[in-house]
Image (tube, coloured by chain):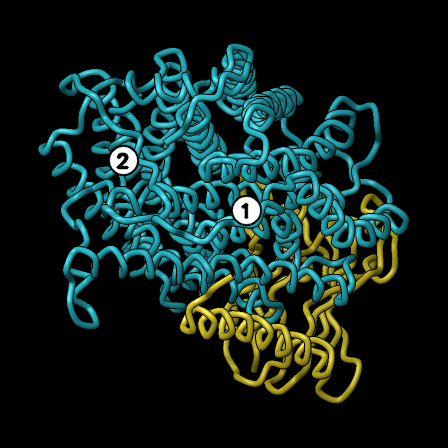
Chain colours: A yellow, B cyan
Amino acid sequence: MKMHLDEKIWLGLSFGMIMIFMLITGYQGFALEMGPPSHKETIDPQKVDQTAPFDQPGIKQIGENEYEVVMTLQIFSFNPANIEVPAGSTVHFTMTSKDVVHGFQVANTNLNAMVMPGHITKITQKFDKPGKYLVLCNEYCGAGHQVMSTTITVK
Amino acid sequence: METVIPQAGKAKTVFKEKANKVLGVNLQDALITKAYMSVAFIALFLGGILGLLQGLNRAGLLELPSWLNYYQVLTAHGLLLVVVLSAFFMIGYYYAGLSHTLGGLLPKVRKIAWIGFWLKIFGFVLVLIPLLLNEASVMYTFYPPMAAHPVFYFGLVFIVLGVWALSIGAFIQVANWRKNNKGKHLPILAFFATGSFVLLVGATAFVAVEVLFMIIPWTLGWTDGINVLLARTLFWAFGHTAVNIWYLTAVSVWYCIIPKIIGGYRWNDFLTRMVVIPLVIMNITGGFHHQIIDPGITPEIKFMHVFMSLAIGFPSLMTAYAMFRTFERTGRAKGGKGAFGWFKKLPWGDVRFLSPFIAMAAFAPAGAGGIVQSTNQLDGVVHNTLWIVGHFHLTLGMSVVMTFFGVSYWLIPYISKRVLTPQMNKLGIVQTIIWTIAMIMMSGAQHTVGLLGAPRRTSYTTYGEFSSTLGWDPYLTMLGIGATLLTIGVIIQVYAVFNMMFFAPKGETEFPVAEEEENAPKTPYWTERWGLWVVLTVIVVGMAYVIPIVDMIVNAPPGSPPFKTW
């Protein structure tokens, strides 16, 4: 098989680029623990209200500048809504859905996760900049999907 | 040329090939392609109009009447363009190609093509009825536990049966040719067709399992709950592969047809086949990257799938090189001098070249965007935002569809025994320019506003004051303008197709398949081992899916009941 030198270089670069992408993704995912939300815990989707911790959704301080938000998503709302945290706090979200698949996205942050019935999603974010953040559902969930939103206020 | 050896089957094939060259298209085969093309472009028209409604709604310029739900419109738009337009075009084009390069379709293959056609049409009617009644506004992805009316899923089953019939027809045609042409390489267009139909069977197998064994028993109330994560996983093994099959179809045009249109030769035959084979083997596993931020899947599995998704990038990068090298060689052979002189020698005024060329060029940013969003962290930024919508309007709406448009300007005259007039060519150029500007505007706006956090599949909303404070509004307006321009493009294109089919001047049009260069190196025969490629595909799919799927079944939560939330 005869190949031109420039083709060999091009394909070498292509292969190298893909490998570098893999290395960076792997390094960030495993060494820096920046992997995507992949929590494995499950729950009975029809008994969310009776199952801890979702029987008491809300926000709880669990350390200095550290909060846990236990949240249920249902058509077409987030519970709890309108969360407030002080600037500089790290917030751990623990979420599940009471009906269909929803999305949990906070604009202007890297918070983005699928919230599925039967599964528990966990994702963490540190809020440094004060302001009002938009929380929205980004997985089509029904006729009122476009109104499913709330806010996080960082003071 | 071919020497006629008085051997039973072979002599017949040679005769048929010659007859084909003299007589042009086989009229019975042409009718099949005509039927598929008509459905494809009617779907483009309807899907395009629905796209306009969404674009204007999203821009805040149009409030939909109360009897028309945004999500119903969006479901129909997705199904018409991703399932009807692309699949019908692909089948019509490949069946014409098989007829042309393999010496006419066998009578039984022709029969199968019609059976497949009517199975698919019947399936679509079944899908359409609940959709029109607003009983199936579940999107192209129909994620459980959202449940449409059972008839919607029965329709999907018939569509898949139609797809299988057509794939079997193509395999019979190819197998028959190989039996009569032992030791010869399958003609390149038929090689692409074989790969595409193999993938089509592989991909639809997953969605068939999802629909037949999970969703239908569940919507009929035979089972209590559904495994939501498993259903999603099976869907994406199909959903992403499907769009990659349309892409592979476009790639076949780039390798086999475009060199002929610009007056050059085909790119190295061996390397061309070496692009098809890995695209077949590695494709199905690429779908998993849609689930990078799903719960219930370990980071290790997700990492393996990032690799499997990115692997498809390699053959695409091979294609990028091959295409530009072919253009450069042809341009130089025509007297283009200097580093870029060859570029001017390309037939820019020929819509059959211009439209697919822009399609290829669009694949550079489209492919780069694809690589970006299949990596873990970057996907976290853009997942389910309008960025994704921008991405597939570049890949499908430009790379694939503009290639198909370019094909229509010779394939429709070819099957209709008519010709492409200079006026029609000019109209095609205008259409190409409008489409290019419109798609760049729309997908550019979608990419940007997606980065700013605007979600996909969401009807007009300001989220209180947020849409203005987050800076979405100007981009959403631009999206609406792009959608309007695209509708003009759709109307011109559909007019062109039906004009060329029924009203253009009569005459003979060539089916332009490029030849290899003289004294081109011989391709090793092992590239023809389709049995082996299928086995390798199954092994790769097994490596990718057995562990996570077993995990999803063994560690499944109690199932979810059906919901109708629209």
Picture mark count: 2
Q: List the single residue furthest toward the right.
A: B554
At a point 73% along the width and 30% down the height, the residue shown is B215
Q: Are the two marked residues, 2 and 1, in contact with CB atoms closer than 8 angstroms?
A: no
The three-letter code of the residue at mark 1 reads His
Q: Which residue is mark 1?
A: A145
In the image, residue B202 sits, relative to residue A40, either above or below, namely: above
Pair 2/1: label in front: 2
Q: SS at mark 2?
A: helix
Q: Nearer the viewer, residue B179 or B59?
A: B179
- A143 left or right of B512 in image: right
The three-letter code of the residue at mark 2 reads Val
Residue B300 drawn at (x, y percent): 76, 67
The N terminus of chain B, quarter of image? top left
Residue B278 drawn at (x, y percent): 59, 52
Q: Nearer the viewer, residue B318 or B449?
A: B318
Question: How busy is the neighbourhood of tag 1: few (under 14 within 10 Å), some, or many (20 plus)?
Answer: many
Question: How busy is the neighbourhood of tag 2: few (under 14 within 10 Å), some, or many (20 plus)?
Answer: many
Which chain is indicated by disc 2? B
Q: SS at mark 1?
A: helix
In the image, residue B515 sits, relative to residue B508, either above or below, namely: below
Tell me the tag on residue B490: 2
Q: Nearer the viewer, residue B459 or B129?
A: B129
At a point 81% along the width and 49% down the height, the residue shown is B546
Residue B445 shows up from this direction: yes
**Cα distance between the residues tagged 2 and 1:** 29 Å
Which chain is indicated by disc 1? A
